[in-house]
Image (tube, helix red, strand yellow):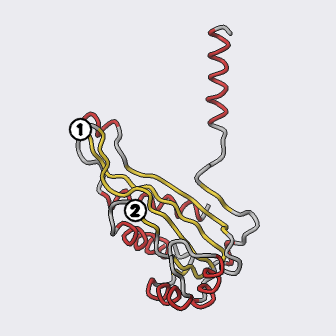
Amino acid sequence: MTCFRKAVAALMLFMMAGCTSNLDLYRDGNMDFGAVHNVAIMPLANLTRESPAADRVRDIFASMLLATGGVYVIPPGEVARGISRAGISNPATPSTEELVKMAGIIKADAIITGTIREYGEVRSGTASANVISLSFSMLEAQTGKAVWSASTTRGGIGIFERLFGGGGEPMNDITEKAVDDVIKKLFQ
């Protein structure tokens, strides 16, 4: 194969990669999201070393979701009461039966679960910066079926941090940006 053909093939692959779908978003086309009025946010799974990360992100997510005016977010105390009354042993990953039972107890139209994969400072050589990586899923309350999921990653070490040092953006700022990104994906 000549160099010209290799270059054309590489260019075509690059162009096709730009045409791929959004892989960090799933939305059930049969779901009527307008019927979702009351949402419960379950305690988030925390895969990081930062023990308060899940509670911090859950609080920010609940506040920002409530601020949209699109849905009512059931208070965490009511969600905890529902978890207890439904007998859910692992609130971060409830079974379908547990989820449906809890939704009936607290009168939720949908349940949101999530996972924090990265939260805090990352280092590469002499550079460091804050990073967050998270994902959320919305489950329909009557069936427990996943109707929406999204993930995002914000922060990290960029060119500026590699060249000039610094710690990147504050953790709260990148957390708000990541949550805002996920909420925009919910209301697309």
Q: Which mark is residue 188?
A: none
Where is the N terminus found, in terms of image quarters?
A: top right
Image quarter of residue 104: bottom right
Q: Residue furthest top?
A: 2
Residue beneath disc 2? 176
Percent coordinates x, y for residue 76 in the rendering: 45, 83
- Residue sitting at 60 percent across and 65 percent down? 187
Image position of 123 (left or right of 1): left
Height in image: 79 above or below 114?
below
Where is the C terminus found, in terms of image quarters?
A: bottom right
Residue beneath disc 1? 126
Image quarter of residue 150: bottom right
Instruction: State the CA–CA distance, disc 2 to disc 1.
Output: 26 Å
The secondary structure type at the circle numbered 2 is helix
Percent coordinates x, y for residue 124 in the rendering: 30, 40
Q: For this rendering, which residue is in front, 38 or 98?
A: 98
- Residue sitting at 42 percent across and 65 percent down? 46
Front of the two marks 2 and 1: 1
Label 1: few (<14), some (14–19) or many (≥20) C-alpha neighbours in 10 Å? few
Please report whichever mark, 2 or 1, sits nearer to the chain's N-terminal start.
1
- Residue sitting at 65 percent across and 58 percent down? 26
Amino acid tagged 1: Thr
Q: Residue furthest right?
A: 30
User: Count of labels shown?
Assistant: 2
Q: For this rendering, which residue is in front, 121 or 19?
A: 121
Percent coordinates x, y for residue 143 in the rendering: 71, 77
Amino acid tagged 2: Glu
The secondary structure type at the circle numbered 1 is loop
